[in-house]
Amino acid sequence: MDKNIGKNHQPTKTRRFKKATAVGLILACLLLVFFPACRKKKSADFNVVLVVIDTVRSDHLPIYGYKRNTAPFLTELAQKAVVFENTFAAAPWTSPATASIFTSLYPFQHRVLMGLLAIRMAKTEDQNLRINKIPEEIDTIAEVMKRAGYKTFGISDNLNIGERQGFTQGFDRFVTYMYQKAPAVNATLKEWKPQMEKGGKYFLYIHYMDPHAPYHKRRPWYEPQTDRHKDLIAAHDSEIAFADMHLKELFHVFGWEKNTLLIVTSDHGEGLWDHGKMGHGNSLYREELQVPLVVYLPGGTTARRVSPQVSTIDILPTVRDLIGLPRDKNNQGLSLLPLIEGRDKDLGDRYFYPYLWKKVRQEIEFRAVIHQKWHFIRHLPERRELFNLIGDPKEQHNLYSQGLDIASQLEKEFNVFLKKCRKFKENISRYQLDEEKMKELKSLGYVE
């Protein structure tokens, strides 16, 4: 209290103080009622598990209408979870797509553009590769979870997800395999189980590789086909079922049905000859971008199907929200909690910007914009395509010439976003290949 104020003024000040305090309390209560985001969130006491099953397009799962029962466990899980019906990856191959999951940034922002895929079809005698690495100044999902009090573990069966590419930032323990398959992944995690469950909650990232080429004919799910293309697809489908079975095993071994937020998705899809090519990393067509996204809340408390379009860049903001952390202004994705809670209109009118850059003898760049029913693709410098996702789900009819105004507006949206968004400085890591790794990469289609 100011010493120059006399005692006779104290009651007046007290009344004013009480009045101001009362007004403040009323305003605070109004904020809490009308603006729930202002409420102080409690920290989460559950585990968080993020599972990426490599190379799974959503329309090859029964929960999205596929005729083959490629994922019985995921189908069962979906009955107690939130299924997002229209989820798009940020890129059509592993390194940039997964970096976008980890950072909630687009590839042209985090700059993870080159990786082992960059040497596919490239005949080179130099086995010292230059590979992009996630810049250290970007917060990855593991770093976020670590600061939130989680123990952090990660395992990847894809060589594209490892220390050289910056994916191990923030992990207490991380191992990268070279396609040792789901049984090896599960065996390692079972060994880690005592450490993971000792004292406190954990964050776990799992990257299964099995549905990726080369496709193995997994019994009893494989159904032989006389047509070569259809037979390869049948083998690919059997690999999805193989991974699904191993995910089910971990779910029960670790008891995730009780106290775990489980998110299951894929890094990207697979061509499967919809536009003439089998694999991925070739285009920004729907079959390489649309992936599953299933969110199982602790205890299986919410079952819902969500139709608005979302992206894998929304995973990190959603996890932040669910564990009680505020939004990170650097994240380009949005929390999906409003959609999980049934507030479908809360995320507004959204645009998504998938991107592909690679160097195969020459630089190749694709840009895309997905907005409502429209999918615009530009293959720099000249080729442009426009598809109606609802009327032409397989994207067989290019409507660009009939929809010039729509395409022009979508391309403008991309250019405006590209200009204003934050872009991080490229970080380069060097990787030396020996003959054994070259053979392995050839078997996976990364080297011709």
Image (cartoon, helix red, strand yellow):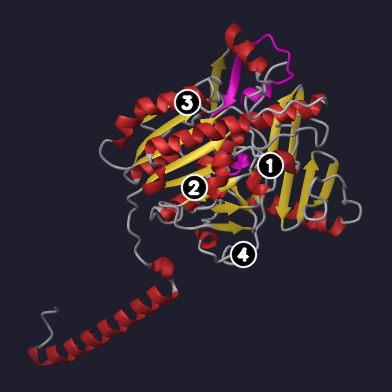
Q: Residue 259 vs residue 281: left or right?
A: left
User: Around disc 4, counting alpha carbons within 10 Å, would you say few (fewer than 14), some (14 to 19), or many (20 or more)?
Assistant: few
Element marked by disc 3: helix
Q: Residue furthest right?
A: 401
- 93 or 359: nearer the viewer: 93
Element marked by disc 2: helix
Q: First in sequence: mark 4 or mark 3?
A: 3
Q: First in sequence: mark 2 or mark 4?
A: 2
Q: Please, is residue 382 above or below residue 181 in the view?
A: below
User: Around disc 1, counting alpha carbons within 10 Å, would you say few (fewer than 14), some (14 to 19), or many (20 or more)?
Assistant: many
Q: Please, is residue 415 above or below residue 23 in the view?
A: above
Element marked by disc 1: helix
Q: First in sequence: mark 1 or mark 3?
A: 3
Q: Nearer the viewer, mark 4 or mark 3?
A: 3
Q: Which mark is residue 316?
A: 2
Q: Please, is residue 231 above or below residue 349 in the view?
A: above
**Residue 134's x, y, as percent?**
52, 34
Q: CA distance from mark 4 to mark 1?
A: 22 Å
* Range of residues picked out in magenta: 105-134
Q: Which residue is mark 4?
A: 348
Q: Nearer the viewer, mark 2 or mark 3?
A: 3
Q: Nearer the viewer, mark 4 or mark 1?
A: 1
**Quadrant position of the C terminus in the picture:** top right
Q: First in sequence: mark 4 or mark 1?
A: 1
Residue 106 among magenta residues: yes
Q: Nearer the viewer, mark 1 or mark 2?
A: 1
Q: Which residue type carries mark 2? A: Leu
Q: First in sequence: mark 1 or mark 2?
A: 1
**Quadrant position of the N terminus in the picture:** bottom left
Q: Which residue type carries mark 3? A: Val
Circle 2/circle 3 CB separation < 8 Å: no
Q: Which mark is residue 289?
A: 1
